[in-house]
Amino acid sequence: MTVKWRAAALAAGLSGAALMTATGTSAQSPAPSPASPEVAHAVPVDAPQTQAYQKADPHHGLARRRAAVAAAASTDAACREMGDFYWEIGDGSGTLASGTRGSRYSANKPLQVASASKLVFAAYVVERVGGQLTPDQLDALEMRSGYDNFNPLACFAAHTVAACLDRRGNGLRNAEHQGRFSYNGGHDQYLATTLGLGDLDRYGLAAEVRRVLGPDLHLDYAAPRVSGGLKASPAAYGAFLRKVVSGHLRIHDLLGSHPVCTQGPDCAAVQAPDLPQPWHYSLNHWVEDGPGGDGAFSSPGMMGFYPWISADRRTYGLIAREVMAPKAYLASMACGQALRRAWNQ
């Protein structure tokens, strides 16, 4: 009985002197008799109780994690100087923690998410083809197709996916860039036309994406640009991320797959955005695997919308804001990384 009681006390967090006080014995003391009150009221820790605790608190200290993330959002240097923003962390079942700084943003305010559109389009393509990507589709989603002459500004007033690709050489292919990473929206725009989306305007594009990913997702497009035209509220984008994390979308199993290098002396990449680390690129998303990185999968947008999925695919998060500031995405990334560190500490 003494062994069971000590095991229960240790499992409850008692040790050393606290254990001696709880049992009323020392290491040299004889074991108490079976009638001892201490033993009579001991509650051994068994498997069903442990499992019940894990089900009730699968994130092992949710209240502590929430407090740590809220503190980081308010006081961490990476977030403190960023101005107004909304943040959220959740898992496949729902939002676990969220908050706002300032009054400009909220969970339900639609924003232009810019390049955060890319992860949504990748999920669409993977779902559309049943997870079986052709070599050409894989090249496009890894930005190795050679279609890297795309300028989104040239799409102004273009009403369809194909019209956007046809403007001012947007659809030109650079043969010497084939097989080499080159960050550009042309890969996705061309791929969209091969999938029969060329005649769709922004409303038709949104309807098609919802048809494939789920009518429950309130995703819209401000322009018929599949790699940068998405418009969604943080709540809507969060719902998309939950479907990925929960495994309801096939891209869950392909996150981080077929990684390609994006920079460095031994990398044949053509062009890449300014990044804090030499990350790899997977299917329309970054793998934050550089030195000191945590391996998260992310899709930052130019104006500061930064969504991510944790390396273990168990949680998601986002920083939501829409600002026209140089490298706004870098500031949001730094803040989001700080929130992840706080969550995991």
Image (spheres, rainbow, N blue to C red):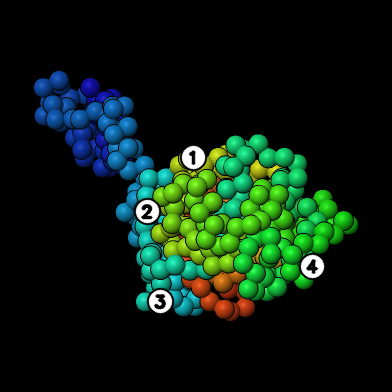
Left or right: where does residue 36 sit relative to residue 208? Answer: left
User: Residue placed at 61% from the left, 50% from the top?
Assistant: 122
Mark sitting earlier along the chain (1/4): 4
Which three-letter amino acid code belongs to the residue tagged 1?
Gly
Amino acid, disc 3:
Arg
The amino acid type, in three-letter code, at marker 2 is: Thr
Instruction: Kindly tell me whether residue 47 is visible in this rendering.
Output: yes
Question: Which residue was labeled with disc 1?
Answer: 247
**For this view, does 161 lie left or right of residue 167?**
left
Which residue is denoted by mark 2 in the rendering?
Answer: 95
In this rendered view, identify the residue nearer to me: 58 or 246: 246
Q: Residue at x 30, y 37 (%)?
A: 53
Counting residues from the N terminus, which is met first, the one under dot 2 or under dot 4? Answer: 2
Mark 2 and mark 1 lie on one chain; the one further toward the N terminus is: 2
Residue neighbourhood size for the residue with mark 4, other residues' Cα within 10 Å, grouped as few (<14), some (14–19), many (≥20): few
Query: Label 3: few (<14), some or many (≥20) within 10 Å?
Result: few
- Give the Cα distance between marks 1 and 4: 39 Å
Q: Earlier in the sequence, mark 3 or mark 4?
A: 3
